[in-house]
Image: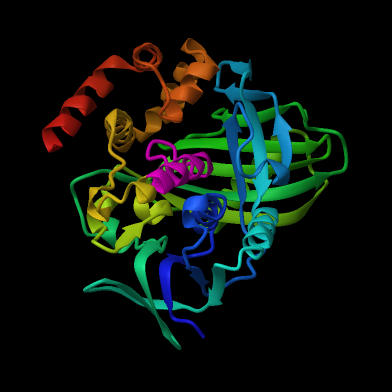
């Protein structure tokens, strides 16, 4: 088997496959040998991704459902927002994996290799990826393998988690409004944390319901599931079938993952800081960051020059400082943001495409004192 490549992508998850697809569709890489290594090349439906966009991107053909409106709910009010020109879309991972692999398999310069990565190292003119059974050499390695210890071993920046458990439920009666995705329902008990329900209805009787927190510490699995059960009960739903479950924990941090890049190894995905720090949402940012990465690779600039820092990194850091110090105020912060601002402006802000006017609108919606204190704290840390 060949063991020398121009590029090796470590991980056949969202970031690895998205990057590979962009390379496959760009003539710049048509003569480059590319290997994608993962210990599991037959991933099942292990997660659901949602995102908003105005125009179709890479994965439009595997969008399984979309909503024109979202609901933001607090204890005292409920707001349904028409998010045009955006649409909120859902992609199931199994369909995305199958779609990406089918297209990539049509390219003779791209090879899938099954193997568990045990070590990645530099050499004089490239890098080496070792598996349990072999080793592979490349001029450039794009590494999506996330190492939580990098965050555990630092104290400079805040690290929260977006952690959740989701049930795919089928009820005995019509309950759900299929035209509205519940983006954040804070009407549930907060218990000193930022907690909300997230609902993606795909029929009047079927939906994904996730109990989600933005906080430092994970909960016992039973606590998430009891919260979903109570929520359904409050909706008057007692007779239902759980057809699938999902769970996850995603880091929310402005940690500088790029500092671990080297001459021949560049980190991508969560391992490269592609997760949106202030929300933990990954899908849309992976689409954006992968496109930017392709432009960077084509520029021929040293990998050590690759950086994701921008003014939104500062905004993210401020919000994370506030949530770390006042996690119980999360519901207030997010409901105020959507109450006082236009959804399109907020989405542009979260997509890091906002104007200064958009940003001022979002900033003015926030509680002043905790955010001013947090801003000085972030600036001081720099």
Residue 74 lies left or right of residue 374; in this view the side is right
Residue 276: x percent and y percent? 41, 40
The colour style of the image is rainbow
- Tell me the magenta residue range: 274-295
Tell whether 171 sits left or right of 121: right
Identity of the residue drawn at 42% across and 60% down:
144
Locate residue 19 relative to residue 91 in the image: left or right.
left
The answer to which of 224 and 371 lies nearer the viewer is: 371
Which of 303 and 176 lies nearest the eye of the viewer? 303
Position of 217 with respect to 58 (left or right) is: left
Residue 93 percent location from the top left of the image: 64, 54
Is residue 81 in view?
yes
Q: Is residue 216 visible?
A: no
Picture coordinates of residue 206, whole percent (x, y): 79, 42
The quarter holding residue 120 reads bottom left
Percent of width and height locating residue 156: 18, 46
Report the residue that reaches farthest toward the right. 173
Quadrant into which the C terminus falls: top left
Q: Residue at x 67, y 41 (%)?
A: 90
Q: In the displayed structure, would residue 111 be above or below residue 258? A: below
Residue 324 painted magenta: no
């Amino acid at each position: 088997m060949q063991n020398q490549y121009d590029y090796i992508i470590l991980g056949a998850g969202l970031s690895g496959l998205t990057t590979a697809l962009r390379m496959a569709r760009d003539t710049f890489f048509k003569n480059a040998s590319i290997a994608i290594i993962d210990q599991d090349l037959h991933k099942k439906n292990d997660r659901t991704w949602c995102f908003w966009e105005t125009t179709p991107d890479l994965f439009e053909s595997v969008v399984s459902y979309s909503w024109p409106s979202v609901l933001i709910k607090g204890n005292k009010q409920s707001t349904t927002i028409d998010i045009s020109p955006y649409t909120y879309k859902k992609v199931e991972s199994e369909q995305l994996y199958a779609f990406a692999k089918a297209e990539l398999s049509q390219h003779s310069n791209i090879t899938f290799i099954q193997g568990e990565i045990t070590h990645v190292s530099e050499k004089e003119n490239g890098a080496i990826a070792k598996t349990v059974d072999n080793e592979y050499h490349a001029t450039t390695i794009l590494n999506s393998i996330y190492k939580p210890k990098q965050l555990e071993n630092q104290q400079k920046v805040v690290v929260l988690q977006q952690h959740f458990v989701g049930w795919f439920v089928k009820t005995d009666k019509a309950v759900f409004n299929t035209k509205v995705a519940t983006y954040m329902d804070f009407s549930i008990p907060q218990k000193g944390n930022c907690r909300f329900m997230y609902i993606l209805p795909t029929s009047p009787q079927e939906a994904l319901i996730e109990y989600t927190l933005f906080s430092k510490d994970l909960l016992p699995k039973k606590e998430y599931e009891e919260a979903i059960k109570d929520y359904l009960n409050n909706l008057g739903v007692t007779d239902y079938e759980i057809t699938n479950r999902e769970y996850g924990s995603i880091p929310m941090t402005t940690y500088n993952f790029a500092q671990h890049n080297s001459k021949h190894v560049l980190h991508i995905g969560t391992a490269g800081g592609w997760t949106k720090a202030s929300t933990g949402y990954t899908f849309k940012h992976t689409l954006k960051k992968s496109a930017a990465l392709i432009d960077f690779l084509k520029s021929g600039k040293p990998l050590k020059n690759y950086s994701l820092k921008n003014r939104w990194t500062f905004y993210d850091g401020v919000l994370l400082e506030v949530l770390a110090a006042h996690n119980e105020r999360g519901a207030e912060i997010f409901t105020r943001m959507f109450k006082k601002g236009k959804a399109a402006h907020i989405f542009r802000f979260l997509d890091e495409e906002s104007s200064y006017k958009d940003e001022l609108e979002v900033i003015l919606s926030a509680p002043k004192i905790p955010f001013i204190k947090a801003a000085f704290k972030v600036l001081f840390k720099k």
